[in-house]
Amino acid sequence: MPKTALIIVDVQNDFMEGGNLAVGDSRSIIDPINALRENGRYALIVLTQDWHPADHSSFASNNEGAEVMSTITSPTGLPGVAWPDHCVQGSEGAEFYADLKTKNTDVVVRKGTDTAVDSYSGFMDNDKQTKTDLEKILRANGITHVHIVGLAADYCVGFTALDAVDAGFNATLFTDCTRPVGADSWGEMQAKLAEKGVTLTESV
Ligand code: VGL
Ligand code: ZN
C-alpha cells in the first residue's frame, strides 16, 4: 500500500513578497497548498525550514566584495549563490508564512544550520556529507511516496525532490504549488527532475 507524505518546503516570510529573498508570485501557491492538506490523503506532513546562523557562508554580506546573486565558492569548495541575508535563526523572516496552514502534528525539519555549507535539499547539505532527519522520519512512518511543494522551485524544492528519488521514494512535484527564483535555473532544474523520474503535474 502506498503511503504518502506532503513535504512543504521553506514557506517562510523571507521567500514571500516583501521578504529579503522574495520569490515572484509566491502568494499564489498558498491556497493550493492549504487545499492539499485538507484532502486527507497524507499520512504525514513535513515542513522544512531554512534556518541559517547570521554568519552563514551563503550570504553575500559574509563574502567580502561579493555581489548579491553572484557565484561564490563555499568554505567546503562548492560553487554557490551569494544570497541576500535570509531566514536567519530566530528572525521574523525565518518564521513560516502566517497564511500557511500548519498543525502541531506537522514535523518541522530545519536545514542550513552549518555556517560552512549551504543546504538546499531538505534531506542533506549541498556537499552531501550531513543528512537532516527527514529520510529517517519518512521511513519511520512507512512513507513510500512524497508530494513536494513550496519555495523555491529551482533550489530547495527541486533539490529535495531529486534527493527523495535517490533515497528511494516516489516523488511528485506540484507545479501550481511552487514558484522559482529564476526562469533559467528553473528550466535547468526541470530537466534534472525529468531525468531523475520526478513527476511534475498540477495538484488539481
Ligand atoms: C532557498 C536560496 C537560499 C530556497 C534557500 O528555499 O529555495 N533558496 N536558501
Ligand atoms: Zn537559504
Image (cartoon, rainbow, N blue to C red):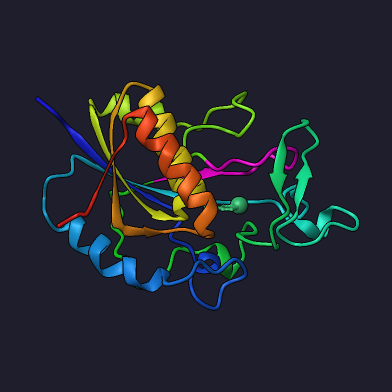
Q: Quarter holding the N terminus?
A: top left
Q: Is residue 74 left or right of residue 30?
A: right
Tell me: residue 159, above or below residue 196.
below
Q: What residue is at 47 percent from the left and 51 percent from the top? A: 186
Q: Is residue 43 left or right of residue 176?
A: left
Tell me: residue 154, above or below residue 94.
above
Judge whether residue 118 is colored magenta. Answer: yes
Q: Out of 65 and 13, give the one closest to the viewer.
A: 65
Q: Out of 149 and 102, give the one closest to the viewer.
A: 149
Tell me: residue 191, above or below residue 85.
above
Q: Position of residue 7 (x, y in %)?
A: 33, 45
Tell me: residue 16, above or below residue 121.
below
Total labels drawn: 0
Picture quarter containing residue 191?
A: top left
Could you tell me what secondary structure mostly forms the magenta stretch? loop
Picture quarter containing residue 97?
A: bottom left
Q: Is residue 41 left or right of residue 20?
A: left
Q: Quarter holding the C terminus?
A: bottom left
Q: Position of residue 172 (x, y in %)?
A: 27, 40
Q: What residue is at 50 percent from the left and 66 percent from the top? A: 23
Q: Which residues are magenta?
A: 108-120
Q: Can residue 133 be spotted in the picture?
A: yes
Q: Position of residue 102 (x, y in %)?
A: 31, 60
